[in-house]
Image: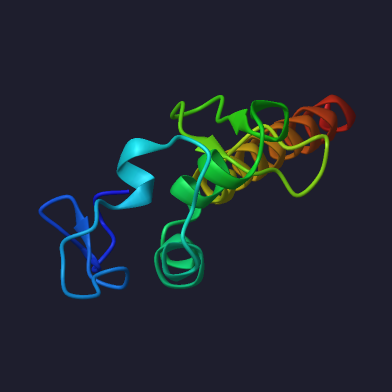
Amino acid sequence: TRECCNNVGGNCLLLDDGEECICVQSISYSLLCRWFRAAVLPLDAVLCAEITKGHDHLKRCCECGASFTPKSNRAKYCPACAKKMRRRKEAERQRKRYWEISCNSKKFDI
């Protein structure tokens, strides 16, 4: 919550009406101001997932350990690691397929 551009020294600029007003997010764990929800959370997906959803909606990446919001119930990896793991598994599949084909062709050559 310290990333909000309206939070200056613990005081909220939007609530300032002549006298300093403490930012409600810095004193409460459940309150989110509209500006923070509209401007800050969309820019940081991990922070948004941790704040707006319960822990039952978050998963930890099996590769890097980062928390992410899954798009399906089968998701194991964060979006960054998912691409890397997909490439790695595809390479393993192709390597296995190549060796199976080359071993089968050698059997028939004898």
At x 24% / y 50%, what residue is drawn? 2
> In the displayed structure, would residue 97 be above or below residue 44?
above
Counting from the top left corner in percent of width and height, residue 6 is at: 25, 68
Q: Is residue 8 left or right of residue 97?
A: left
Q: Is residue 106 left or right of residue 60?
A: right
Q: Is residue 40 left or right of residue 10?
A: right
> In the displayed structure, would residue 38 be above or below residue 12?
below
Image quadrant where one finds the C terminus: top right
Q: Decide which of 95, 31 is in the foreground and name it.
A: 31
Counting from the top left corner in percent of width and height, residue 80 is at: 49, 50
Counting from the top left corner in percent of width and height, residue 5 is at: 23, 68
Q: Residue furthest left?
A: 9
At x 72% / y 27%, what residue is drawn? 56
At x 60% / y 37%, what residue is drawn? 77
Q: Decide which of 27, 50 is in the foreground and name it.
A: 27
Q: Is residue 57 left or right of residue 26?
A: right
At x 37% / y 47%, what residue is drawn? 25
Coloring applied to the structure: rainbow
Quarter of the image for residue 60 reads: top right
